[in-house]
Image (tube, rainbow, N blue to C red):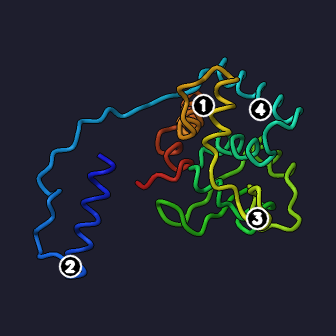
Amino acid sequence: NRTLALLSKMFNLAERWGLRPDGSNPCRHIQKYKEQKRERFLSELELARLGKHLRAFEADGTELPSVIAAVRLLLFTGARLGEILTLRWEYIDDERGLIRLPDSKTGAKTIPLNLPALDVLASLSRDGSPWVIRGGKDGRHLVNLEKAWRRIREKAKIPDVRLHDLRHSFASVGAASNLSLPVIGGLLGHRE
């Protein structure tokens, strides 16, 4: 389905640019495979195990501090991976406890910061980089968490959990706290 979408986009652009005749996209009538929506939430036990292993990685230095901070911010904010990896210090409103993203998947977005998220941000150095989640190279943000996330989730015995599932878990904690669906949707930055 992803390959079909990519090819279709390429052929549509070729038509728009005059490289192919209009209506000649060969992907037009190809049926997509049926997909099942995946909803995975971490249980309290899994969250506790993940927290324990993040602390262990932090203590022994086997993962970059920025990797651990990124995972924690994903858990504590419900933000999307790209929003956390490209988060700049200038987007943090310390006074109000907010992240103010000028652009996201759904446009400009404000993310309230709870105490654990504020603690994560306070633990990070602001010197020398505009990025909250620093990469391995100076002046760059972290671009990929997949390998580190694979190591972390294997240790925490949650091998089937994707990074996006941390966003689902944030929402499920909100639901368990009796927050309404519109409030949870607002926290996640969903459009109405």
Instruction: Give yes or no for contact between labels 3 and 4 (Cβ–Cβ under 8 Å).
Output: no
Mark toward the viewer: 2 or 3: 2
Q: Residue furthest top?
A: 45
What numbered label is drawn on residue 173?
1
In which quadrant of the rendered view does residue 18 lie? bottom left
Kind of residue indicated by mark 1: Val
Numbered disc 1: secondary structure: helix
Numbered disc 3: secondary structure: helix
Mark toward the viewer: 1 or 4: 4
Q: Residue furthest bottom?
A: 18
Q: Picture coordinates of residue 145 (x, y %)?
A: 64, 45
Gap in Å between the C-alphas at discs 3 and 1?
27 Å
Gap in Å between the C-alphas at discs 1 and 2?
51 Å
- Residue at 69% in and 55% down: 142
Q: Picture coordinates of residue 183 (x, y %)?
A: 53, 45
Gap in Å between the C-alphas at discs 3 and 4?
23 Å
What numbered label is drawn on residue 54?
4
Numbered disc 4: secondary structure: helix
Identify the residue under disc 2.
19
Mark toward the viewer: 4 or 2: 2
Sooner in the amino-acid sequence: mark 2 or mark 3: 2
Mark toward the viewer: 3 or 1: 3
Sooner in the amino-acid sequence: mark 4 or mark 2: 2
Q: Picture coordinates of residue 92 (x, y %)?
A: 74, 62
Kind of residue indicated by mark 2: Leu
Gap in Å between the C-alphas at discs 2 and 3?
43 Å
What numbered label is drawn on residue 150?
none
Identify the residue under disc 3.
89
Kind of residue indicated by mark 4: Leu
Name the side, left or right, on which 181 lies relative to 79: left
